[in-house]
Image (cartoon, rainbow, N blue to C red):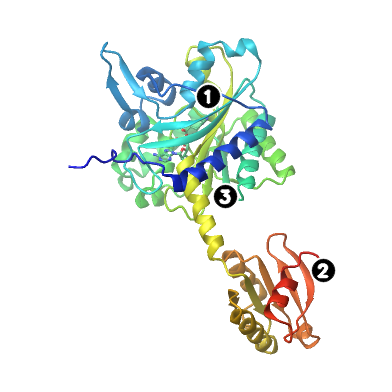
Amino acid sequence: MKITAIRGFRDILPDESGLWQVLTSQARASFSTYGFSEIILPLLEKTELFARAIGETTDIVEKEMYTFTDRDDSSLTLRPEGTASVIRAYIEHSLHQKEPVSKLFYIGPMFRRERPQKGRYRQFHQIGAEILGRDDALIDAELLLMLNDFFTALRLDVSIDVNSLGCATCRPRYRERLRTFGESKFAALCENCHGRLQRNPLRILDCKEEGCRHATIDAPILADFLCDPCRQHFGQVQTLLHNERVKITVNPRLVRGLDYYCRTSFEVLALGLGSQNAVCGGGRYDGLVEQMGGPAIPGIGFAIGVERLAMLLQAQERQNAEAPDMFIAPMGEVAENQAFAVARRLRQDGYRIELESGRRSLKAQMRRADKLAVPYVLILGENEITAGKGTVRDMQTKTDRSLAVDLSASAQDMMKAIRASDV
Ligand code: HAM
């Protein structure tokens, strides 16, 4: 019988590994502009490290770790994430004594025994980054800015969801309030959430079960419970990003599956990835270094899932490859006739042209053109067309310019004029 790979463990074949190269190189390039250096960590650690750092009652530690007893009876675990190992190394090598702020990144495989599905594997890879030694809002904003730069450089359209998870002063009050709320909805919650109510009530906000989502729709939100310093901190992070025109979405229901987070927490979500749409997760963990036996040093970081990122890039490339060369948006009946003739002329020469009905609004047509990822839209307005003109919109730069529509010109000349970037 032939031997196959273990369930949830994938081979990255040559047709995919090139893409991985592209995105890890981009990560190295983006991170180095912010002063990060690489740390290379072991794959195996003592089990205790993850139990203490991630939290005994998290799904990862309770159900998903690959743990085994070594020949000397010690319990070892294949790392399910990188943050715990970074903190261990940071304390073990007293990195805080060498520099007041450490900015470290890592790239490598992680192991979680989850139920495999598209975008979720038992061995997966992360590109992670951690900053130790600063707790001001500026550094949180900088880290999010770096993430934004990275996704922008890859031309990926993502949504950065952020929330503040408060601190040891304000969160306990919220946790109790949420527990009381959850108990009032007990019958509507799933069995998993019954357990969560006892162990970590915040996680009921994160349940994927329809019944739980419905029952917690009007749950109290943490934002209303934040103490003044946490509120200020979060406000400043948002202002800094807003000033840099980084689009973030404040999601008051965002909670994380690992216990160590406080204050700024975030997830990067991608459209078109199905249910496994989180390409990156992270946040602040101010008490963790101390809890792990080190000095009271704050930290913040994130990890990007490489498999999901590669899937996203592939989907985008596919979409670009299939996109029409041009979209024609006629406005009204006269323009429609002209558009019909232009489309026919161009298609005869093999150009892929998408033609819309002149009865749809320009806004609706543009939305569709955006969705199809076309590079150019030829807008034919009623008045313009009688003057033998149209407008070309460059969809990448979102700029318009006027164009003479000459049906006696060859298809190539017509396309050339449309694609000419500056006329
Ligand atoms: P996490 O949210 O558990 O955070 O994982 C980060 C990312 O790893 C996820 O957003 C996802 O893209 C990817 N990922 C997680 N599990 C799987 C899986 N089974 N298959 C494929 N991809 C997966 C952490 O791991 C934290 N250590 C992040 C962090 C760093 N927080 C602070 N610093």
Q: Amino acid at mark 3?
A: Val
Please tell me how crowded label 2 is: few (under 14), some (14-19), or many (20+) other residues with Cα within 10 Å.
Answer: few
Mark 1 vs ligand 1: CB below 8 Å: no
Q: Position of residue 383 (x, y in %)?
A: 78, 85
The image quarter containing residue 150 is top right
Q: Position of residue 129 (x, y in %)?
A: 56, 30
Q: Which mark is residue 168?
A: 1
Q: Amino acid at mark 1?
A: Ala
Say whether residue 177 is left or right of residue 335: left
**Residue placed most toward the observer, 350 or 82:** 350
Could you give the CA–CA distance between mark 2 and mark 1, rounded to whole angstroms? 60 Å
Could you give the CA–CA distance between mark 2 and mark 3, rounded to whole angstroms? 33 Å
The image quarter containing residue 203 is top left
Secondary structure at numbered mark 3: strand
Secondary structure at numbered mark 2: loop
Q: Amino acid at mark 2?
A: Val
Q: Residue at x 51, y 44 (%)?
A: 18
The image quarter containing residue 48 is top left
Q: Quadrant of the C terminus?
A: bottom right
Is residue 179 visible to the viewer in this orientation of the structure? no
**Residue placed most toward the observer, 166 or 65:** 65
Q: Residue furthest left?
A: 1
Residue with the mark numbered 2: 423
Q: Earlier in the sequence, mark 2 or mark 3?
A: 3
Please tell me how crowded label 3 is: few (under 14), some (14-19), or many (20+) other residues with Cα within 10 Å.
Answer: some
Q: Which mark is residue 93?
A: none
Q: Quadrant of the N terminus?
A: top left
